[in-house]
Amino acid sequence: MLAQIRYLLSTMPIAIAGLVVSSVAAGLAEAGVLAILAEAALLIAKHQSHIATSVGPVRLDASIGTLLAFGIGLAFARLALGVITSFIPAWISTSMQATLRSDLFDAFSRASWDVQSRDREGHFQELITNHINGATQAYQVAAQLITAFLTFFVLVISAVALSPFAALGIILVAGSLAAVLRPLGSLGQRRAAALSQGWLAYAGGVNEAVRLAEEAHVFGAEEHQRVRLDDFIASFRRPNLHVNWLATLVSSVYQGLIYLLLVVSLLILYAAAPANLGSLGVVVLMLVRSGSYGQTVQSAIQMLRQSQPYVDRLKAAERSYRESAAPVGAIPLERLKTLELRNVSFSYDRTAPALKHLNMEVTGGETIGVVGPSGAGKSTLVQILLGLRAPTSGDYLINGSSASEYTRESWRRAFAYVPQEPRLLHASVAENIRFFRDISAESVQRAAIDAGIHDDIISWSGGYDTIVGPRADAISGGQQQRICLARALAADPDVLILDEPTSALDPLAEQVIQNSLTRLRSNLTLFIVAHRMSTLEICERVLVIVDGEIEAFGSVADLLGADGYYRAALTASLTPEATLAKLASRE
């Protein structure tokens, strides 16, 4: 609770200062209105038109008309101040929501791929939506708590001026209820933590169901998906019930107890000072209003405690993202001359290495194929080459210097990537090729020509403005792959890494990609990860990875002349006649 208030003080000092001033002023105005109401009511009951008395340290000597006119002025002031004290928490809430979302996404976007890839499906989406909403509520309630507490405090001070016993009654009410309701607050916080975890699991299940909707239809798994989602919903139904019930229960219990304690306080006040009916009337009104603000304070405290798990989880996630950000190098990467792995190993869990003691050197402009059985470590190698993961041990060198020493901007210009599964934005073709980068229309078109997709694009009704992407008008898998290839080429990279670029394409689409790569290889250092052996025909050397280790690294002719995975895979992919012809052509 105090943490949220301290955070607001540090990030929005002017807003909080304005809230404090307006809340104190509103409390004073309200105390004045209550005092005038009590005294005016007493005058009317006695059929008197003039007052000459003391209310605490204040001496009143005026007609009832003057007194009520002054009361109307105070009431208008209280109304205006109420508008301000309601606007500032709303403004704080809106600003905090935007700030939290911006900060969380900023941290996520700067996090290492290693941390991003370990997030469960739907985890980040849930954090940046429902968890942000829960945390935002905490800060809004913290602002409302400041207003309610300061108004409550001003009424206590005003009551002290009238009667110390009044202040004692108010403090007794507030302190007693705080003690009684504290266990409910702790229970609400525990239930809110369980609800937070339940929302994360549910978000993951929903994202998974959407991603696998096609397969669910094909395999008739819709009912099982519904049951699975119902299980997720049931898992947080009870904590959700408890959280909502406790939030209401605190208010209801407070309201019931406040009347009991108010009656006891009035008995004490009457026994102590029964003669001063005017002051007693003011005290009664202040007790009632104090009870109302006390109820607001208690409800705010309960809501703050129930929002705390959302705040804690967001802070932990943001901290994890920021701590994982890779160090920023200082050397600009010029044209690539050499790329070298020296005794590089990598492990995801520090026990079973995915890559073991890799050693290789590539000269700029080479075309390198990468092959190996599934699970051999090819994807991990690609991520290391792209700088997405750092080796667990060993050195990754570019032009003789550690890859980590280069600036992020020059690295991203130098390295480009085409994934096995094309991923398009729901946007125009041109925007998909630019991919949020400052790239001219001429460079976009040049990249499309190099990728062999330009003629297709200009045949579409919208040309480069045609909307493509998930759920948009369908284009073929080969066209999507070539748009992604154009995206990779648009910034004129030095190194292009393609992960299974033709694995899902028909022979004609594969040939188009092959032709594009053949044209490009003289200007780029190419790494082509492939299962189709035909894709490797343009490669000068082929790296064979088996069980995370380099089994062989040489020309196609060298690999054909030796036993190993490459020769076995080639033999399996060809007819016997084609195999003999292939081997004969290499002799």
Image (cartoon, grey):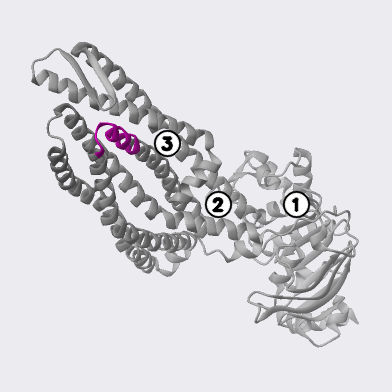
Label 1 element class = loop
Answer yes or no: is residue 422 visible: no
| Residue 272 spot, x, y in % from top left | 16, 39
Q: Is residue 284 magenta?
A: no
The residue sitting at 76% across, 39% down in the picture is 440
Picture quadrant of residue 349: bottom right
Whether 207 is drawn above or below 468: the answer is below
Tell me the CA gap for discs 1 and 2: 22 Å
Question: Residue 144, relative to residue 327: is it above or below?
Answer: above
- Residue 344, given in percent of the width and then of the height, sits at 78, 75
Q: What residue is shown with label 3?
A: 90
Q: Amino acid at mark 1?
A: Gly
Q: Is residue 429 above or below residue 59?
A: below
Residue 28 appears anywhere in the view: yes
Which sits in the foreground, 458 or 200?
200
Q: Please tell me which of labels 3 and 2 falls first in the chain.
A: 3
Splitting the image into 4 quarters, where does residue 262 fall?
top left
* Side of 265 relative to 429 (left or right): left
Judged left or right of residue 161, residue 523 is right
Query: Dot 1, crowdedness within 10 Å: few (<14), some or many (≥20)?
Result: many
Cα separation, mark 3 vs mark 1, equals 54 Å
Total marks placed = 3
| Image quadrant in which the C terminus is located | bottom right
Circle 1 residue: 452
Mark 2 element type? loop
Residue nearer the viewer, 30 or 97: 30
| Res. 93 image quadrant | top left
